[in-house]
Image (cartoon, grey):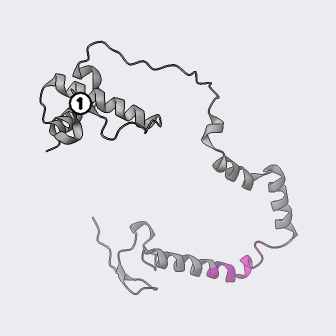
Amino acid sequence: MKRFAKRKCLHCAEFYLPDRRNLHQQRYCSKPLCRKLSKAVSQRRWLQKPENENHFRGPENNQRVAEWRSRNPGYWRNGKLAAKRPLQDLCSGQVAHNEEVTEKTSTYTLQDLLLTEAALIVGLISTMTGDALQDDIALTILGLRRRGQDILSGNTTARPGNAQTRGRNVATKVK
């Protein structure tokens, strides 16, 4: 692999390795400010050439731009409208039916209550309550779930620390 000589940036005067694909033309380093200055200098140099002096002026360019605009109506507006359109408008309208949620009263097992991240939740509850038996932890989970449902439904009139299990308050069992 060839090693290229470092060059001094014409703007910040720091040494840099030029891009191997642009060895002969690169005079500025890749810092954003130096790149911005490089672009300005190259545009100024291009516009100063006599053949480019009126490149964007004159009746020919006016006609060319007018034809392009007639072929592409609303080009500048389409992107802005699409970006402002809320996602909900793109979704199909589907009516939600209210269904009453009923809690099972059959026997609960810990595995039925916790399908995801069970080890984390079991460890946390076991640490909070000091219990290690699955039946005790399952009762605690039921109380906590009931309390969470009350909070989410807006029923905050329940007693503070209402997550009770077996007649004991969970908050008092934290060690």
Identify which residue is drawn at 58% across, 21% down.
97
Identify which residue is drawn at 80% across, 55% down.
68
Image location (x, y in percent) of residue 166: 21, 26
Count of marks overlaid on the render: 1
The one nearer the camera, 73 or 142, is 142
The magenta segment: 44-56
Please state which amino acid type lies under the numbered disc 1: Ala
Image location (x, y in percent) of residue 27: 46, 80
Above/below status of 115 relative to 57: above
Query: Residue 17 sits in which quadrant?
Result: bottom left
Query: Residue 117 sits in which quadrant?
Result: top left
Q: Residues within 10 Å of mark 1 (few under 14, many from 20)?
A: few
Q: Main secondary structure of the magenta part?
A: helix
Q: Note whether residue 18 is visible.
A: yes
Residue 50: in magenta span: yes
The one nearer the camera, 130 or 80, is 130
Image location (x, y in percent) of residue 43: 62, 77
Q: Note whether residue 25 is visible.
A: no
Side of 49 where 172 appears, left or right = left
Query: Residue 151 sits in which quadrant?
Result: top left
The one nearer the camera, 153 or 33, is 153
Residue 82: in magenta span: no
Question: Mark 1 = which residue?
Answer: 118
Image location (x, y in percent) of residue 134: 16, 24
The N terminus sits in image quarter:
bottom left
Identify which residue is drawn at 29% across, 26% down.
142
Q: Secondary structure at mark 1?
A: helix
The one nearer the camera, 44 or 167, is 167
The C terminus sits in image quarter:
top left
